[in-house]
Amino acid sequence: MDDPRGDSSLQTNLSSPIRSHRSIIYTTEKAVVVRGSSDGALIWRKESPQHCNPDTAPTVAENTIVTADKRVAGWDISTGDRKWEVELPGASAAAQIKNSNGSIYVPYAGGLNGGVISITPGEKITTWSVSMDHAVSSGAVDNTGIYIIDDDGLLRHISNGEVIWEIYMSGNSFGSPDIAGYEVQAPILTDNEVVIPGIEIPSEGTRRGAIFRFDQDDGDYLGANRDVPVIQFDGVVYNDTIIVANESGVIASVDYQGYGTDWERSLDQSITTDPIVVDKTVIVGTGDGIIYGFNADDGNTLWDYQVLNERISGVIGGQDSIYTGGFYNSIGGIHDSQTVSARSEFQNSLRQLHTGKTYGIDTAKATAKLSEASESLSNREYEAAIEHAKEAREVIGNGVSIVRETQDTIRSVRQSANTIGNQTSYNTAETLTKINKAETELQNRNVQAANELALEAESEIKNIESEFKNATTEIDNLNQSISEAREKNITVTNATSTLTTARDQLQNGAFNEATRTANNSRVELSMRIEYIERYRNKRQELTESFETASNEAINVTEGEKLYTQASQNFSQQDYENANDKISQAVNVTQNTIENAQIATQLIKKVEGFSPIQPFVQTLAKNMGSQDHLTTAKEAYNNAQYAKAVESAEAARSAQRNARIIVLAGGVSTVSGYGYYRYNDRSS
């Protein structure tokens, strides 16, 4: 899981992780980081390069995380607040920090020399330091003090700033003539003994390791085991043996009071971590991101897991769990599957507790519930742990919800204000000032005041965002209307210059003015487009009607006059009247054509009326059919097509009535002509 650095640069190295308070803790070159041990989720992170060094693993003393580089600092494990700091004048931390009996021990290096500083936190911080002749490696601590050795073989037991005893191993002061041929490692404490691993430096041949034993009380030399593998990592005591390892992939169990090894195993890849022992299982990490488990009694391989995709820098063990830190940018963990739900619930509550403590919320009840959850986890009572963790979260939930709501509001408002400020000249300083005050109130643990300020700023920025959005929307719409007009070959007149004006207004932060400017121009242009499009469609329709009239020799003078008027209106950009006139022209022309076509059809039918019964034709004429026909033709020739239709229909009506009279009942009585029977009733 990548460490959140807040920039895009390559991730720096991570220290070996440590585990405490059900959290995973490590440092980078820039920050101290605390993550949940159940899922690796970030609990808090404090950037402080002067106090952090990935080569110096942190330690935890009670409720305080201690980190070091050029300065040593104590951090509240729940909130990340820095509780104290101590400067290392002219030096920096050189190895893993140790703590015992309330005191913090920091090995340091300055130039070619080194030493150790002891810090005892309290109402008044007390310190002491002891220098060494050369650079130092990590020390070993017990309740009496620290045992530390420098690169030249000076071994000292120091207590309360006093050197209890010292031995210059390279000086053969304890009667071991070949000790000077070894490169010594960090001390290891066993029952009443100090064990110093060493690596033989032969003039030729294969290097071997050795372990040298000294009495803890007075430093007397107790003997050595010179037939062991090369030792390059801090060993771990298991029963009467020390588990050691080296970068070549060798891991072994060494009988530090006897000779040789109890067992020795070799991996086909490099070991990159100190060995640890968890429940009789020796665990090491490798350069390929794999952890191996060996039986601590006989060295048999028990299992291996690929946990990371990079070199592992440290392995730590917990109850039913193993955690690993990557050298570059990852941490990982393995849990017993039946514990995952309980761990996750605990972790969620722990994050809420951190938030509550950070912002001054009363966390006493939640802390008590979380302590019960932790105890249940330790006792493997997972259902009880889940319940206690949920209860802790419920107790503190409302206050934390307000804090998180305020944090989210602050982030959102600041992002929106910066976005508007970057895109326009609108002055968001007042809103940003208010949100900065909210953030300050939150940091000062005035949660309610912070929330009120954040909500006020949110209301302001939402109004500004709404105005900004309306302006940009109207400007976009105007731009689209201009594009549409150009695609349709419609003149945009002053719309382009108006668009520029609206954009300038937007840029200057005059959002409402920009909205009005763009909207008015868009509405005007949209209406022009609509009128012109409608006019063009009507004109096309009218053109087709004129062609029909011309082909059929129909007089459409009235429609042509209306079209002339429409064209004049259009050229004068009087689009509304132009559309009215051209619509009238279309209607008049189409009605004229329709009447002319109907009149033509009716006249043809009247003229083609020739029943076989002469009495029908004669009767029709007597009823006025011929007169109506004559009137219809005259009206048609005079372009009075509606009258032509009316007269032609009257002629047809006379012809139909004459036939009805003659054919009524099959035998009709016709005055002056006698009785006739007609069987043919066709027209």
Image (cartoon, helix red, strand yellow):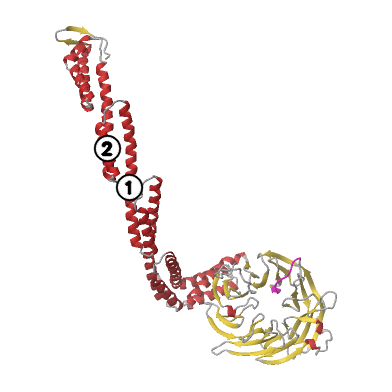
Left or right: 494 in relation to 276: left
Q: Give me the residue at 35% from left, 64% from top.
A: 510
Image coordinates for residue 99, horizontal then vertical, percent: 63, 83
Q: Which residues make up the magenta segment?
A: 268-277
Of marks 1 and 2, the one in the foreground: 2
- Which numbered dot is residue 564? 2
Q: Secondary structure at mark 2?
A: helix
Name the quadrant containing residue 7: bottom right
In which quadrant of the rendered image does the N terminus lie? bottom right
Distance between the Cα atoms at labels 1 and 2? Answer: 20 Å
Task: Specify the amino acid type for callout 1.
Answer: Arg
The image shows residue 221, relative to residue 363, as above or below, that is below
- Which numbered dot is residue 528? 1
Image coordinates for residue 380, horizontal then vertical, percent: 60, 70
The image shows residue 142, relative to residue 206, as above or below, that is below
Left or right: 603 in relation to 83: left
Q: Give me the residue at 16% from left, 7% from top.
A: 673
The image shows residue 160, relative to residue 652, as above or below, that is below
Task: Specify the amino acid type for callout 2.
Answer: Thr
The majority secondary structure of the magenta stretch comes to loop
Upstream in sequence: badge 1 or badge 2? 1
Q: Nearer the viewer, residue 132 or 276?
A: 132
Q: Residues within 10 Å of mark 2 (few under 14, many from 20)?
A: some
Image coordinates for residue 160, horizontal then vertical, percent: 65, 91
Q: Is residue 416 visible?
A: yes
> Is 271 contained in the magenta span?
yes
Q: Secondary structure at mark 1?
A: helix
Q: Nearer the viewer, residue 312 or 640?
A: 640
Q: Give me the residue at 56% from left, 84% from top.
A: 85
Q: Give me the residue at 65% from left, 65% from top.
A: 308
Q: Is residue 384 visible?
A: no
